[in-house]
Image (cartoon, grey):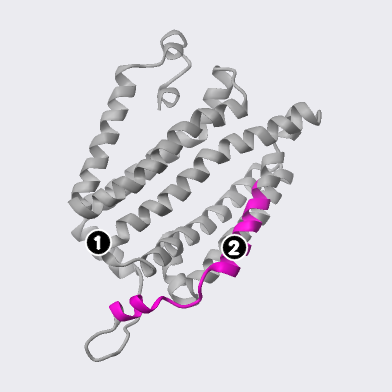
Amino acid sequence: SDVCSSDLLGDKIGRKKLLVAAPTVSIFTSLATVHVQNPYLLMLLRSIDGMALAALWPSAFGIISDYSRSKERAKAMSLFNISYMAGVACAPALGGIINDAAHFAFHVPEKVAKQASFYACAVFFVITAIVALVLLPNNPPQHKTEELTNPSGEIPAEGGINFADLKRMLGEIPMVLLLAFSIFMGVGLIMPYAKVTLTEHFHITETEYGGLIFGPAVVIGILSLFLGTMGDKIGKVNATRLGLGVATVGFLFALAFPSRSEEHTSELQSPCNL
């Protein structure tokens, strides 16, 4: 519902404003997280951060759609995915390096050293907000205006998603919505435990954990450009089916060949493999 509301808000006040406001909110939540000890306040901060993130993505996708022609849209999304995966690849390693440097180089206590990455995160959000404010255009490109213009010469409102559309989609494409829900729920179940499991049970540093993610993330980012081009050729439906098939094979492979540590340690469960 946050994404739906944010999409409507982006249509009313403008996507650029949301793309500036969202990282600005995350600046303050990152800094506040370091000083919050109450778990309920921490949950509140994470909720606010989640709403900012929900405002960010629809606006980002909308701007990509505005500035790419329909025939090249999948390729444009792939380029966006490369940028995203580059951040995913570098962030854990960089965060681990910052935390480890604070602990080992500057002799900050380990618990306090883990706060260093939150301050670094706030700096990156400052840069993001400035870049969005300075570089993002205020108006849609000319070709987008031409695509939206109807025969009478009037430009209809872009509209976006509303709750009536959501209700209609629940009736027309329930499996697609269920698929999206299951994917993000699966990601949400893994993310909180993956780092903790690896660092505690395998006794690796945060820098080493970042290094483990770096390689696969770079490969995925590079391949996404070619896969996006293929998606334009074979169609979005076939590309989606192919992607789900490859992901299913990957999960089955992880279940069929468990890690050596899992075989000998009853505490370790599937998050270690995933």
124 drawn magenta: yes
Q: 48 left or right of 126?
A: left
The crowding category of the residue bearing disc 2, from other C-alpha atoms within 10 Å (few below 14, some 14 to 19, many at least 20), is few
Residue 11 image-quadrant placement: bottom left
Measuring 29% from the left and 77% from the top, which residue is drawn there?
Answer: 147
Measuring 59% from the left and 18% from the top, which residue is drawn there?
Answer: 203
What is the magenta range?
121-147
Q: For mark 1, what is the residue? A: 169
> Looking at this rendering, what residue extends furthest in the right direction?
107
Measuring 52% from the left and 53% from the top, which residue is drawn there?
Answer: 50
Residue 161 image-quadrant placement: bottom left
Task: Name the secondary structure under disc 2.
Answer: helix
Residue 158 shows in the view: no
Q: Residue 139 at what x, y percent from top left?
A: 46, 78
In the rendering, which numbered label is found on residue 118?
A: none
In the rendering, which numbered label is found on residue 131?
A: 2
Q: Amino acid at mark 1?
A: Met
Q: Magenta part mainly helix, strand or loop?
A: helix
Q: Nearer the viewer, residue 193 or 235?
A: 235
